[in-house]
Amino acid sequence: MELAHKATRIRLFDFKSVQMRAFHMSWLAFHLCFFGWFGIAPLMAVVREDLNLDKSMVGWSIIASVAITVLVRLIIGPLCDKFGPRRTYSTLLILGSIPVMCIGFADSFESFLIARLCIGAIGASFVITQYHTSVMFAPNIVGTANATTAGWGNLGGGTTQIVMPLIFAAIVSLGVSETLGWRLAMVVPGVMLFILGLAYLKYTQDAPDGNYSDLRAAGAIPYAKNENSGWSSFRNAAKDYRVWALFVVYAGCFGVELTINNVAAIYFFDNFHVDLKTAGLIAGLFGLMNIFARTMGGFFSDLSARYMGLTGRVRFLFLAMFIEGIALVTFSQMEVLATAIASMVVFSLFVQMSEGATFGLVPFMNKKALGGVNGIVGAGGNAGAVLAGFLFKSESLSYGQGLLILGCAVMVCSLFAFFVRFSPEVLAEEKAAFDTASAGDDPIKARGTGDPGAQPA
């Protein structure tokens, strides 16, 4: 569906316009979801001892944490088309807070596995974040907007690695045992998710001109049924081979990031013999790159589109992802702590730029099936994480060997970017829309366009 009055620029200190409220609330929600989703990861050394988990069991818990998200991401996109991102996000946050708070009741491998499986559902928050910014921002800035909200959300993967060990340490310092400490620590992100779920419902709306229910009642957008239903959106997206090509691409970037979020702390703890806090701080550097790296991917995607159209977005995506694979292979071979950290930071830069570049393309795949496209491509990230997880549960492979294989797989995945092609008509149409939105960013030029559909926020 086409929506009017999308923002043509990002004003970070604007908290009043509906576009920027959606921008800030969506990245904050996704950020906090990481605390619930991966809050247990930097505490795994303690959990492993408490529940007597071996490497295979830890590996299965990693797989469980991302497996269910594949299914939920496929479902959540069409739900956004039907109910709107506001209600969908609020419901996911509130329901998702329950297993986060309840993982502390786990007393065996089986119960811990089920808890991590249920928690994984909140990873679908990414799809809603990207959906919400896609309907709020115009073509000239949507790549940067998507990349920034996702990047600042992914930043939660870094702050979680740093903050959760500190929360755990603070609880233990009060005289609580480590066995109880990790359980109480997980209550903190659960409570925050519940509160934010209520706030999202109150302070955001679905689109620049209102909520979907009101827009449908006014006849501004069609009702979500028949060819405009959420499931029709999914079917239309699933028929497009280019969407599945981006599914593979996203598996090779976001899937890798999720995997590193799960294994980084324990990798440095075991291989470089640092303590739990230090391992968390080092692992946190990987996620902290999201404060600017993913935005860079979206920015360069938009910049490439300015000079080469949608073809430029495709070429940049391939380049960023191929370098990501090379950097991961390099990281896997490091045996000195300082060089391992340095190579991890370089690798982190390109994996997150690749993610931003991927969702610099997504809004242009099929505008009538935005939810379906977002859901399928987003699910690709978790599918990649599930497959990568098997590399780190095997007793026959070291973590370093698993990272080496993963780096080679990323380089292969980068080639799938070239399957994303557009007809000459679409290229011309999107170039015109880009130019119109860019003109809309200049009040003098905007008066000459006569286009009310792209206005500054």
Image (tube, rainbow, N blue to C red):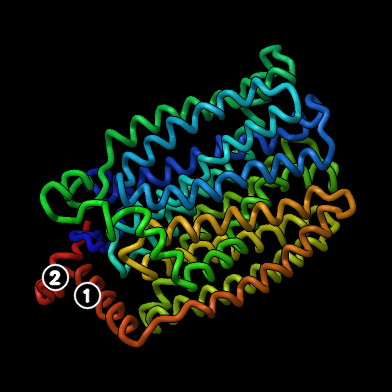
Q: CA distance from mark 1 to mark 2?
A: 8 Å
Figure quadrant of residue 301: bottom left
| Residue 436, numbered circle | 1
Q: Amino acid at mark 2?
A: Asp
Q: Amino acid at mark 1?
A: Thr
Whole-percent x, y for residue 376 in the image: 48, 59
In this rendered view, identify the residue nearer to me: 348 or 454: 454
How many discs appear?
2
Seen at 48% across and 77% down, the residue is 420
Say if mark 1 contacts mark 2, CB within 8 Å: yes
Whole-percent x, y for residue 323 in the image: 64, 72
Which residue does the numbered mark 2 point to in the structure image? 451
The quadrant of the picture occupied by the C terminus is: bottom left
The quadrant of the picture occupied by the N terminus is: bottom left
Seen at 36% across and 59% down, the residue is 233
**Looking at the image, residue 145 lies above or below residue 449:** above
Whole-percent x, y for residue 25 in the image: 36, 42
